[in-house]
Image (spheres, rainbow, N blue to C red):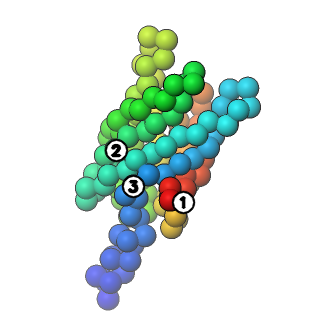
């Protein structure tokens, strides 16, 4: 029975693939962020793509972890010659992930949806 419960939890936390989220951008324009997740056991790899100045920018995920239905990872951006580290934590809920991003302009929350 315990193995069955563990299998159900692991299946619920499958984040493999592309996910998209909108967050408030500068001047009130929504910013779309695309996450590509590649979990390998408890390790989470992949990339984050967002648009800066009209140009898409993709950065790798670092320090990625999967723990049940919780994920966490970092992204390092270079903006105006400075490195900014953003950290994400998220709770997987079926086809959505409730994410909190910290760093840069302070904590922001967003909901990522599984891309079709």
Task: Name which residue lies at 48% across and 52% down.
Answer: 19
Residue 95 sits above or below residue 46 on the image: below
The residue that mark 2 highlights is 46
Task: Identify the mark at residue 96; answer none if there is no mark.
Answer: 1
Is residue 84 rendered to the left or right of residue 66?
A: right
CA distance separating discs 3 and 1: 12 Å
Q: Do the residues labelled 1 and 2 touch (CB within 8 Å)?
A: no
Q: Is residue 45 visible?
A: yes
**Where, by quadrant of the figure, is residue 81 drawn?**
top left
Circle 3 or circle 1, nearest the eye: 3
The first of marks 1 and 2 along the sequence is 2
**Where, by quadrant of the figure, is residue 39 drawn?**
bottom left
In what element is the residue under mark 2? strand
The first of marks 3 and 2 along the sequence is 3
CA distance separating discs 3 and 2: 9 Å
Task: Name which residue lies at 41% across and 32% down.
Answer: 58
């Amino acid at each position: 029975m315990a193995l069955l419960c563990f299998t159900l939890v692991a299946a619920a936390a499958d984040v493999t693939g592309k996910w998209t989220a909108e967050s408030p951008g500068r001047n009130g324009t929504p910013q779309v962020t695309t996450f590509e997740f590649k979990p390998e056991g408890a390790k989470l790899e992949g990339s984050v793509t967002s648009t800066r100045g009209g140009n898409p920018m993709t950065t790798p995920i670092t320090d990625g972890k999967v723990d049940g239905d919780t994920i966490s990872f970092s992204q390092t951006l270079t903006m105006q010659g400075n490195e900014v580290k953003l950290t994400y934590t998220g709770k997987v809920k079926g086809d959505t992930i409730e994410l909190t991003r910290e760093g840069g302009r302070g904590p922001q929350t967003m909901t990522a949806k599984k891309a079709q």
